Amino acid sequence: MQPADRLIDNLASLATVDADGGFSVVHDAAIAIRDGHIEAVGPRAEVHAAVALAAGAEVIDATGLSAVPGLVDCHTHVVYGGNRVHEFDLRAQGADYERIAAEGGGIKASVRMTREASDDELLAAATRRLARMRELGTTTAEVKSGYGLTAHDEARMLRTARAAGAAAGVRVRTTCLALHSTPPEADSPDAYVETAIAEILPACAELAEQADVFLERGVFDVDQSRRYLEAARDLGLGLRLHADQFSELGAVGLAIELGALSVDHLEATGPGGVEALADSDVIAVGLPVAALTLRRPMPPLREILDRGGRVALATDANPGSAPCLSLPTTMHLACTQMGLSCAEALAAATHGGAAVLGLDHEVGRLIPGQRADVVLVDGPDWRSLIAELGAVPARVLAG
Ligand code: NIG
Ligand code: FE
């Protein structure tokens, strides 16, 4: 084994999905790192016996701390102009999210403010948000477009996301969400879908790894979503769907038919959707902050897990439905509101998120060969990161 250039030593505990997909907790642990990758990890004595330290290696004394993998936030909308804090206050006083959207607020308001923002303003705001996410433990994040809705503005959002990730030290993967809403200049939703297929997707294909659609009553239907997603697939993009947030229109069936990577939201998913998802490879992404903030039912991740399905957790960080940058808070909600254990929540916000992004062989676990993305938790029990509402890690390292 090659000498390590960094050693995280004296960890009280370490928790991770392991190489076989099980969940491991190791006490009195260490992590040896070389060139930003994990060289050895496990009980201290074993790591010390297996790995020599290079001259000048950095040794981090983690006495009293614990470690989990760098968190993977697989669903965010952190590039946007302006804010919609007044909508939060209106909803607090009883206003309805879908009604606000139908009256030109919501996503359409963010589209106006994003188009008006300068490149510098967009980049500065997105960088601040990603830097905050990193402080909260996120080392890999997906960022969507969807507030531009022209080829120029969607591409601008995706470029901004990548630049902001580089500036904030977060590994960013981008998703083209051209079908987020119909922009005011389009003649009809159908006409806009054709524009998205003919102009926006081709302009964004090199700037994104995935494509997403908001399949929802009053937004885009199954046929429109299918046309767009098939075009995205032909361009080599992975497929995602905002599915069943308010109504079940067939998004889950479409996702399975097209071999999508994930369906995200699922607040309105009934028993049939749960069964179908559990029997498929499509990953169910729970966004409990959006459910909490909009007073919607929590997504049925417990039921999907119990039936053997695949799940992930994400913040959905955005200016409307989910004003939250914190995966620790998201995991807390998954435990307190959805009945996941701490181990299930951590697995969903690390390995699960990495699988949604096609990065599960690179990040999301503390195992040899993976990127040395490590969250040091303030306390001897790693579960403090989840149990304490609003927890902030002691330190976040990225390989
Ligand atoms: O995931 N549901 C659609 N899109 C976002 C909301 C975006 C917004 O409110 O600006 C979501 O909840
Ligand atoms: Fe979303």
Image: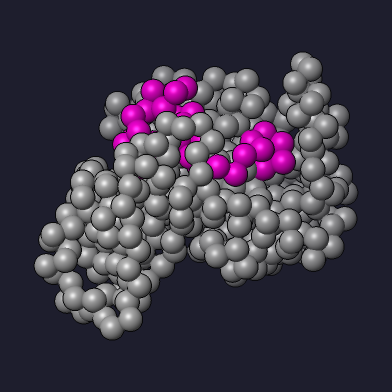
Q: Is residue 75 above or below residue 105?
A: below
Q: Position of residue 284 (x, y in %)?
A: 43, 37
Q: Quadrant of the C terminus?
A: bottom left
Q: Position of residue 163 (x, y in %)?
A: 65, 68
Q: Quadrant of the N terminus?
A: bottom left
Q: Is residue 346 above or below residue 305?
A: below
Magenta stretch: includes residue 326: yes
301 vs 167, left or right, is left
The residue located at (46%, 56%) in the rendering is 396
The residue located at (61%, 57%) in the rendering is 131
Q: Is residue 124 visible?
A: yes
Quarter of image, res 32:
bottom left
The residue located at (79%, 35%) in the rendering is 85
- Identify the colour scheme used: one colour
Q: Main secondary structure of the magenta part?
A: helix
Q: Position of residue 66 (x, y in %)?
A: 33, 47
Q: Nearer the viewer, residue 208 or 321?
A: 321
379 vs 144, left or right, is left
In the current view of this chain or complex, which residue is farthest to the top?
Answer: 94
**Number of dots carrying numbers:** 0
Quarter of image, res 157:
bottom right
Q: Is residue 237 visible?
A: no
312 vs 265, left or right, is left
Q: Is residue 254 above or below residue 172?
A: above
Q: Nearer the viewer, residue 83 or 10?
A: 10
Q: Nearer the viewer, residue 80 or 381?
A: 381
Magenta stretch: includes residue 27: no
Q: Nearer the viewer, residue 100 or 56?
A: 56
The residue located at (47%, 47%) in the rendering is 393
In the current view of this chain or complex, which residue is farthest to the bottom?
Answer: 55
The residue stretch that appears in magenta: 318-347
